Image: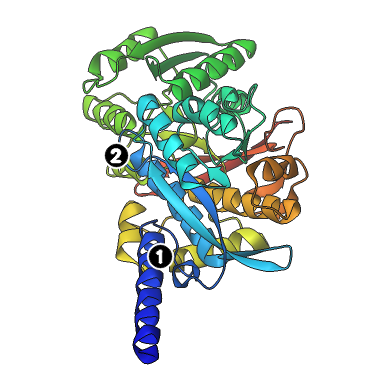
């Protein structure tokens, strides 16, 4: 009987451990973690990103950076105990209504800190949910100032749209001697409308004239907007928008013979943009956070390892757009993860409130530059942007722009 009871207990324990392993495996991005084996306690990091919708392509690239970081640093020591870091990944579907549901699912999963999102609108929508639950969120590439405003639980590792808008206004004024700019954004979309506004203000401050227009969600024909830019006599088009629309704008401009340079912000540093521009003479520029040709120690090491990570898995390559080009948002995803780890180490706790307090003391060298947090805003103290041009299937570095110009 004793042998039978011992065998029964062993089988029960095996079943329990197997069940725990399946639950851990259901959360994508736990590669390399021992959490599934149940050998260490687990701290959960939520990943709040779009895998579908207008921003799905960029969201997948941001997640790849986070997943690679989890592979590089799969554990963290808290009070002498090693914790496995488990990623809980949700799809906010690029929409503000789905964002709240996705955010709540992370709260319910018991995450200690959240990373994301690609797209300021969904970040703004989810912010109150994370604040109410006292779970800090770290934006990777969401650049609208409203993401962190009046919310002590939202932080970010990227630069902001006022800076980015000013950078692009100065760039087009210098690069093209532009005096007239045509600004096109999607109606009601926080990221694009915000960045368009900051660009407009900065360009006018430089003495330029601006014509602004908006297009409704779901637009597929941009020919009338492009002809309006031509009729206005625009020297440059500034069209910050989701890559799905950007691809149409670029393609239709090239097809209709519109030769005005087309520019935008960080979301355009995407394989979708490269595919749209490839084989055309269209001039396409964007500002961004990182250049894979940066030869500094941390950056070059990241690029080498990340490319190996991409090429080791066919699904990773697919999620990256079918190539191993290193997107800036992947570097930011990596840095956001490392920022979360730094905060957890400083807090020596898995409590969201403790990690939130520790965020203000984060201070380390990261892939996209040194990261420290502004005590008043919760934003990273970033001062530089990269300007790149889409050129026949690849991004070419144009210049590095600082706040001082």
Residue at the far front in the pictured view: 1
Q: Secondary structure at mark 2?
A: helix
Residue pointed to by mark 2: 276
What residue is at 51 percent from the left and 65 percent from the top?
A: 71
In the rendered image, the vertical position of residue 345 relative to residue 210, given as above or below: below
Q: Is residue 37 left or right of residue 206?
A: left
Asked whether 390 or 107 is in front, the reply is: 107
Q: Using the image, tell me which numbered label, if any, was put on residue 246.
A: none
Determine which residue is flagged by label 1.
20
**Disc 2 or disc 1, which is closer to the eye?**
1
- Report which quarter residue 289 is drawn in: top right
Percent coordinates x, y for residue 93 in the rendering: 34, 35
In this picture, is 117 found above or below 196?
Answer: below
Mark 2 or mark 1: name the one nearer the start of the chain: 1
Estimate the x, y position of residue 217 in percent, counting from the top left. Answer: 29, 19
Within 10 Å of disc 2 (Cα), the crowding (few <14, some 14-19, many 20+) is: many
Q: CA distance from mark 2 to mark 1?
A: 45 Å
């Amino acid at each position: 009987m004793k042998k039978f009871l011992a065998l029964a207990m062993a089988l029960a324990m095996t079943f329990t451990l197997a069940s725990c392993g399946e639950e851990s495996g259901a959360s994508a991005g736990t590669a390399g973690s021992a959490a599934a084996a149940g050998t260490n306690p687990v701290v959960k990091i939520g990943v709040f990103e779009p895998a579908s919708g207008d921003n799905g392509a960029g969201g997948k690239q941001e997640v790849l950076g986070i997943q690679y970081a989890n592979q590089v640093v799969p554990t963290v020591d808290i009070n002498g105990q090693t914790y496995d870091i488990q990623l809980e990944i949700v799809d906010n579907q690029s929409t503000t209504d789905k964002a709240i549901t996705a955010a709540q699912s992370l709260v319910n999963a018991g995450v200690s800190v959240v990373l994301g999102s690609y797209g300021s609108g969904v970040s703004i929508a989810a912010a109150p949910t994370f604040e109410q639950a006292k779970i800090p969120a770290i934006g990777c590439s969401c650049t609208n100032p409203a993401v962190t405003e009046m919310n002590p639980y939202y932080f970010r590792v990227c630069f902001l749209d006022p800076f980015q808008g000013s950078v692009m206004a100065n760039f087009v004024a210098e690069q093209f001697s532009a005096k007239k700019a045509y600004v096109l954004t999607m109606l009601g979309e926080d990221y694009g409308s915000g960045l368009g506004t900051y660009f407009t203000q900065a360009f006018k401050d430089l003495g330029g004239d601006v014509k602004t227009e908006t297009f409704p969600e779901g637009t597929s024909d941009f020919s009338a907007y492009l002809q309006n830019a031509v009729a206005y006599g625009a020297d440059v088009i500034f069209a910050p928008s989701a890559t799905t629309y950007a691809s149409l704008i670029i393609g239709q401009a090239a097809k209709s013979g519109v030769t005005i340079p087309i520019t935008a912000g960080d979301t355009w540093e995407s394989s979708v943009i490269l595919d749209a521009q490839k084989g055309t003479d269209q001039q396409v520029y964007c500002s961004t956070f990182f250049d894979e040709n940066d030869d500094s120690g941390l950056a070059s090491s990241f690029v080498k390892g990340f490319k190996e990570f991409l090429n080791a898995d066919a699904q990773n390559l697919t999620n990256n757009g079918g190539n191993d080009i290193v997107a800036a948002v992947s570097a930011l995803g990596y840095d956001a993860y490392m920022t979360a780890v730094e905060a957890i180490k400083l807090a020596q706790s898995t409590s969201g409130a403790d990690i939130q307090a520790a965020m203000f003391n984060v201070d380390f060298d990261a892939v996209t530059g040194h990261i420290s947090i502004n005590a008043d805003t919760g934003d990273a103290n970033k001062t530089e942007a990269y300007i790149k041009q889409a050129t026949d299937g690849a991004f070419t570095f144009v210049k590095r722009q600082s706040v001082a110009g």
